Image (cartoon, coloured by chain):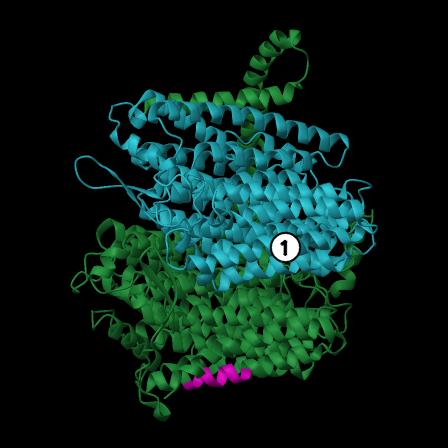
């Protein structure tokens, strides 16, 4: 490895280093109350390195000198394991931003824990390292390792509260993730067996030469790709691999769930886009149908079951499944069936563009909602929607912000998700998936029902207690920043949209 | 000539007053909440001035094409934001800012002492800004953004007194039902996206509204982009959105419930402006609708049916605001029917006069409530002695609604009836005939419920107001079931005329309801410098200019014959109501109740609420559909999964009972998911 290689992976090194630093600080720091602020401050490392790379990159495809990033012609360059391009950097910014907000929002929350505060933050940072790597990985083994680096700390974090619910949720998360990892590894092995390479670029070439009447051209490839998508489906929380979601959302610590629902999902979508579009593009018409089916199932199951939930965190569990469905619509919309006799798939950049924009908009809205819930639940110690009664009198501002974020999740302007939904459904229509777009529009109308119900409870039913709800400045700051981002993306979406389009250009096949 | 900045200011001024009231006054100076009212009124006064300036500029025929600026670029399609200023826009701007200004002045008195005074003005400013933005939008996406914002502010205002469960439920209902209509609207927009390339090839932008008009014209150069059945579906999609907002059957049920909001809100939003947005939307895309006889037929018939159907429910309501709500739905039906028959100018003319007299009726109801504390007409009566000014104004507005010559409503309704009778529109003759009959029958019903409302409220002897109402409610439900606010919200009974801040705006609207119809559309000579058929000609010319002079229904000359017919219809309705109500023996009972089954059917609103809420939502959806999904999820899927899980668990006893059954089940679920996918792909 050359010095330049270290520079290429510096954001990841900095993030992992930050995690280690937090653990070390935890040993020597007498006042544990300062830990969140330190964890926040050390994020400057990965952020600055990403920023430097961003400007360094300029108009170039990626940071690897000379040789093509996706081949192994120049073995000195990290063996083609990662590609630091606009796409990876987009997710670096998204993930670092999310982590920063989650850390800020956790300040009050961790105070209730007697021990392991340092570990809490360190685990978040380790998971973030994995997520950032996932967005850059271009090789199957790296993808697998990054995925495990993401999942294992999250499983530990889910079980962090040490009560029955939390431990059970952590255990379930761990076991289900192990099973899906196994499925994915098996899929990867089959793909490797067929193509003879773990590099996405080489896989793409090998698949291009395969011909056959079976779906995906070949049975080994067929089963391999389906198994890999199933493994990713777990991380995406897409149906039918969604069953763990409500349990984990109900049991885990609220800031961790926020982190899980936003950053983990974004990273999973990043790797799915990378694998499907740069690795498996030649069989895109086959996996396009599969992804469209998963999208439809996720939207329907998520929205319908959410209606009958009485626990707000379970409700958000189903809500996140439905949003995974909307985003998958954008993934499916990235493929157009081309003209001509062979019906070769055509890349439609608008699909992945809309996915990236939706992820950013969803991150802002969902974090706002979860931060509000964190502040509320740490005071009323209940997650029943009925206990949110009269919140408008106990803290009108908090109730107002939560209401705004719920409307944002419905997709009401002027919030980011409105633009994002329009964008994603447009992409679907553009790629000929009109049925999916219509299904999506109907589902968004249905979703108004359960989101608005929460607003109604907060504002209309009499409060059960007169105690005011308040939080310390740091969580409020996180709430304010996320809320501002949510509205900003609705009014001036151009900035994020252009960044998304730039990023997707790195994917172009 | 009006400048571009001035037109933007019409929209930005109320937005600024919203920001000021919400972000400055409410958090920091809530003790001096009167400031937010005064700032809002100042902003709206200026906006009204600019609106009139814009109208004048349009009348003088200035070129008001402004360059839109680019907002977004999505997949090769450019979405712009800009101003579309044509006669329709100019007229709507004056109506919206004018009525809004008057209602805000009135609210100074009506909302006085309310704890959330600043919040009220913040919402009202937000609504007005959104509505003005909607009217000005030159791009369908821009229009949709404001369309939704109008919906959100309506939601906030209906639920303004959110401590009341009924208000909150009504707000939610309004939000959800209008969104059902919006599904159609959004699908229409998405369809336009698919045509972006075809538009671009013709040098057009698929979202720019005048470009959409052009693409719908068969003879234009860019014609045939939209055409045939697709055009019909596109128009019907837009109409679905419009029907939701304008409370057209079957999406009308939210509007009567929306009366839970403060009365000035009902006057502004649920009578004069927001509900008219649906009519505006159809008018905005009229060049598209006009190309599809099928879509026009649907619009006409839905409008006509709504007109008579809603009016019939207005006959039996006891709540004065609900009578007016059904009346609003019915009048919106008249406008829709007119549009469906191709009577573009007449529909908008009726929208304008309706805005004046219906807003006045609502403000009158607010004034009555101010005095009696209730909205229930069974506890009113004899109020003309105590509220003489309100009485006179309500009678003027009521007769205008009925369509008595020479009040405003007569002229606009007459245009519609005459046009319907002539039947020159794009629809078949039978559609015109059916619509005409429904609308004429509607006149009789309208006259009846209006006079019934006036008599019950203002004549006879006073029946006790809120005090009596609470007393009776307490008797019938002794277990403390009566709500302390009753259904009003304005304290006890104090029979006196309202303060001048409330009366003055009513007088201004009263002058409008009196004169607007004739002055805006003189029928004979060039009165005081206003040309004959001014407003219909003005609007019609605007439409003609937009289409490059594609034909539209001609302005019809006044017909004595039609005026006689409609006046006879109105007078027969009035006479009947006077006979039944004015000298009735038992002041406390409604003579209509004797028509037992009919009365029950009407007062149960044809059981549509029951159908929607109990049968479709509660039983159909929750109990059966969601229940089934839930049951399948819990029993069938989990059951099968459990069964297999049980199998593996028993095999696994040797290995140890590490897993709980549930996780095992989830894992099996994943395995089955994979299998299902593989099978599905193989079979596909």
Q: Position of residue B510 (x, y in %)?
A: 54, 80
Residue lying at the far bottom of the rendered structure: B528
Q: Chain of mark 1?
A: A
Q: Is residue B674 left or right of residue B461?
A: left
User: Is any atom of residue B440 visible in this view?
Assistant: no
Height in image: B305 above or below B568?
A: above
The residue stretch that appears in magenta: B45-53
User: Which residue occupies 51% across, 42% down?
Assistant: A133
Q: Quadrant of the N terminus of chain B?
A: bottom left
Q: Position of residue B625 (x, y in %)?
A: 53, 32
Badge 1: residue crowd in 10 Å (few <14, some 14–19, many ≥20): many
Q: Nearer the viewer, residue B482 or B393?
A: B482
Relative placement, left or right, of B125 versus B164 is left
Question: Does the magenta stretch mainly form a helix, a strand or a loop?
Answer: helix
* Residue drawn at the location 62% of the way across and 11% of the way down: B649
Q: Give me the residue at 69% from left, 56% from top.
A: A399
Question: Percent x, y for residue A413?
Answer: 50, 59
Tell whether A79 sits left or right of B195. Answer: right
Q: Quadrant of the C terminus of chain B?
A: top left
User: Which element type, helix, strand or loop, lies under badge 1?
Assistant: helix
x and y percentages locating residue B65 in the rendered image: 32, 78
Chain B as rendered: colour = green
Residue A476, visible in the rendered structure: yes
Residue B116 higher or lower than A384, as above or below? below
Q: Is residue A327 above or below residue A396?
A: above
Q: Which residue is mark 1?
A: A403
Of all chains in the rendering, the one displayed in cyan is: A
Q: Residue at x 53, y 53 (%)?
A: A93
Frontmost residue, A435 versus B352: A435
């Amino acid at each position: 490895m050359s010095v330049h290689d270290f520079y290429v992976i510096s954001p990841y090194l900095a993030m992992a280093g930050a995690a280690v630093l937090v653990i070390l600080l935890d040993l020597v720091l007498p006042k544990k109350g300062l830990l969140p602020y330190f964890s926040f401050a050390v994020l400057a490392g990965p952020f600055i390195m990403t920023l430097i790379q961003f400007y360094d990159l300029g108009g170039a495809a990626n940071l690897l000198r000379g040789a093509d990033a996706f081949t192994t012609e120049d073995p000195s360059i990290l063996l083609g394991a990662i590609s630091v391009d606009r796409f990876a950097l987009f997710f670096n910014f998204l993930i670092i931003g999310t982590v920063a907000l989650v850390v800020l929002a956790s300040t009050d929350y961790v105070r209730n824990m007697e021990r392991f505060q340092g570990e809490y933050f360190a685990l978040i940072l380790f998971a973030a390292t994995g997520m950032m790597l996932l967005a850059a990985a271009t090789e199957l083994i790296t993808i697998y390792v990054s995925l495990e680096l993401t999942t294992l700390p999250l499983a530990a974090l889910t079980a962090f509260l040490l009560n029955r619910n939390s431990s059970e949720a952590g255990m379930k998360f761990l076991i289900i993730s192990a099973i899906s990892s196994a499925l994915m590894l098996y899929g990867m092995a089959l793909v490797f067996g067929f193509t003879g390479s773990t590099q996405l670029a080489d896989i793409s070439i090998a698949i291009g030469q395969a011909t056959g009447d079976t779906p995906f051209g070949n049975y080994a490839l067929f089963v391999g790709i389906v198994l890999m998508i199933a493994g990713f489906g777990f991380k995406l929380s897409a149906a039918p691999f969604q069953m763990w979601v409500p349990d984990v959302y109900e049991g885990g610590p609220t800031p961790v769930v926020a982190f899980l629902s936003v950053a983990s999902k974004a990273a999973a979508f990043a790797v799915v886009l990378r694998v499907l579009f740069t690795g498996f593009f030649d069989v895109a018409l086959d996996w396009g149908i599969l992804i469209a089916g998963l999208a439809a199932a996720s939207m329907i199951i998520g929205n319908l079951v959410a209606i009958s939930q009485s626990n707000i965190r379970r409700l958000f569990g189903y809500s996140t499944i439905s949003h995974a469905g909307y985003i998958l619509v954008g993934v499916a919309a990235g493929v157009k069936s081309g003209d001509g006799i062979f019906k070769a798939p055509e890349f439609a950049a608008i699909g992945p563009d809309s996915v990236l924009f939706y992820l950013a908009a969803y991150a802002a809205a969902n974090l706002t909602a979860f931060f509000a819930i964190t502040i509320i639940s740490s005071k009323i110690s209940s997650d029943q929607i009925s206990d949110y009664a009269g919140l408008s009198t106990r803290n009108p501002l908090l109730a107002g912000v939560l209401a705004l974020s719920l409307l944002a999740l419905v997709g009401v302007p002027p919030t980011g998700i409105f633009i994002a939904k329009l964008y994603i459904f447009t992409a679907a229509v553009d790629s000929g998936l009109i049925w999916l777009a219509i299904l999506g529009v109907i589902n968004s109308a249905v979703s108004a029902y359960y989101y608005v119900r929460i607003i109604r409870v907060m504002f209309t039913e009499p409060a059960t207690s007169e105690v005011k709800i308040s939080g310390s400045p740091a969580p409020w700051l996180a709430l304010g920043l996320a809320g501002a981002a949510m509205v900003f993306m609705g009014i001036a979406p151009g900035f994020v949209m252009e960044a998304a389009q730039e990023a997707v250009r790195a994917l172009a096949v | 000539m009006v400048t571009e900045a001035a037109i933007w200011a019409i929209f930005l001024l109320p937005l600024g007053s919203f920001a000021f009231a919400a972000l400055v006054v409410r958090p920091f100076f809530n003790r001096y909440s009167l400031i937010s009212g005064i700032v809002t009124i100042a902003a709206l006064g200026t906006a009204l001035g600019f609106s009139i300036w814009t109208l004048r500029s349009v009348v003088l025929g200035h070129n008001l094409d402004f360059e839109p600026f680019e907002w977004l670029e999505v997949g090769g399609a450019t979405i712009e934001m800009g101003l579309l200023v044509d006669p329709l826009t100019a007229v709507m701007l004056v109506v919206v800012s004018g009525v809004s200004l008057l209602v805000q002045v009135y609210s100074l008195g009506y909302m006085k002492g309310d704890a959330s005074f600043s919040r009220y003005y913040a919402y009202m400013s937000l609504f007005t800004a959104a509505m003005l933005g909607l009217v000005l939008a030159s791009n369908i996406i821009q229009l949709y953004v404001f369309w939704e914002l109008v919906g959100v502010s309506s939601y906030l205002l209906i639920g303004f007194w959110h401590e009341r469960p009924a208000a909150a439920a009504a707000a939610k209902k309004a939000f959800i039902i209008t969104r059902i209509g919006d599904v159609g609207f959004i699908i229409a927009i998405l369809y336009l996206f698919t045509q972006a390339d075809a538009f671009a090839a013709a040098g057009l932008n698929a979202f720019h509204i005048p470009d959409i008009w052009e693409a719908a014209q068969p003879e234009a150069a860019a014609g045939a982009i939209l055409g045939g059945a697709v055009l019909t579906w596109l128009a019907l999609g837009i109409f679905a959105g419009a029907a939701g907002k304008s409370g057209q059957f079957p999406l009308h049920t939210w509007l009567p419930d929306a009366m839970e909001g403060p009365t000035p809100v009902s006057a502004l939003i649920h009578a004069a402006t927001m509900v008219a947005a649906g009519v505006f939307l159809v008018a905005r895309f009229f060049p598209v609708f006009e190309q599809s006889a099928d879509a026009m037929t649907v619009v006409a018939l839905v409008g006509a049916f709504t007109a008579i159907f809603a009016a019939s429910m207005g006959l039996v309501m006891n709540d004065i605001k609900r009578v007016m709500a059904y009346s609003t739905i019915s009048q919106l039906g008249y406008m829709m029917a007119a549009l469906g028959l191709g009577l573009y100018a007449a529909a908008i003319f009726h929208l304008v006069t309706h805005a004046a007299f219906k807003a006045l009726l609502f403000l009158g109801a607010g004034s009555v409530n101010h005095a009696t504390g209730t909205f229930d007409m069974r506890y009113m009566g004899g109020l003309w002695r105590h509220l003489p000014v309100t009485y006179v104004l309500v009678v003027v507005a009521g007769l205008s609604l009925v369509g008595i010559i020479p009040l405003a409503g007569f002229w606009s309704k007459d245009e519609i009836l005459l046009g319907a009778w002539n039947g020159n529109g794009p629809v078949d003759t039978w559609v015109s005939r059916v619509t005409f009959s429904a609308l004429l029958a509607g006149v009789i019903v309208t006259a009846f419920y209006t006079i019934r409302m006036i008599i019950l409220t203002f004549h006879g002897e006073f029946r006790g107001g809120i005090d009596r109402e609470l007393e009776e409610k307490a008797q019938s439900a002794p277990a403390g079931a009566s709500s302390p606010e009753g259904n009003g919200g304005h304290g006890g009974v104090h029979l006196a005329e309202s303060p001048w801040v409330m009366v003055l705006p009513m007088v201004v609207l009263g002058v409008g309801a009196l004169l607007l119809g004739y002055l805006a559309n003189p029928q004979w000579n060039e009165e005081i410098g206003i040309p004959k058929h001014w407003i219909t000609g003005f609007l019609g010319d605007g439409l003609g200019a937009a289409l490059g002079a594609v034909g539209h229904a001609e302005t019809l000359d006044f017909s004595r014959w039609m005026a006689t017919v409609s006046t006879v219809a109105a007078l027969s309705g009035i006479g009947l109501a006077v006979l039944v109500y004015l000298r009735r023996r038992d002041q406390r009972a409604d003579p209509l109740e004797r028509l037992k089954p009919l009365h029950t059917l009407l007062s149960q609103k044809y059981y549509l609420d029951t159908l929607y809420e109990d049968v479709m939502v509660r039983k159909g959806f929750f109990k059966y559909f969601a229940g089934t999904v839930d049951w399948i999820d819990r029993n069938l899927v989990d059951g099968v999964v459990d069964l297999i899980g049980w199998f593996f668990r028993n095999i696994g006893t040797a290995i140890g009972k590490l897993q709980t059954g549930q996780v095992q089940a989830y894992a099996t679920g994943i395995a089955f998911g994979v299998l299902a996918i593989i099978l599905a792909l193989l079979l596909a």
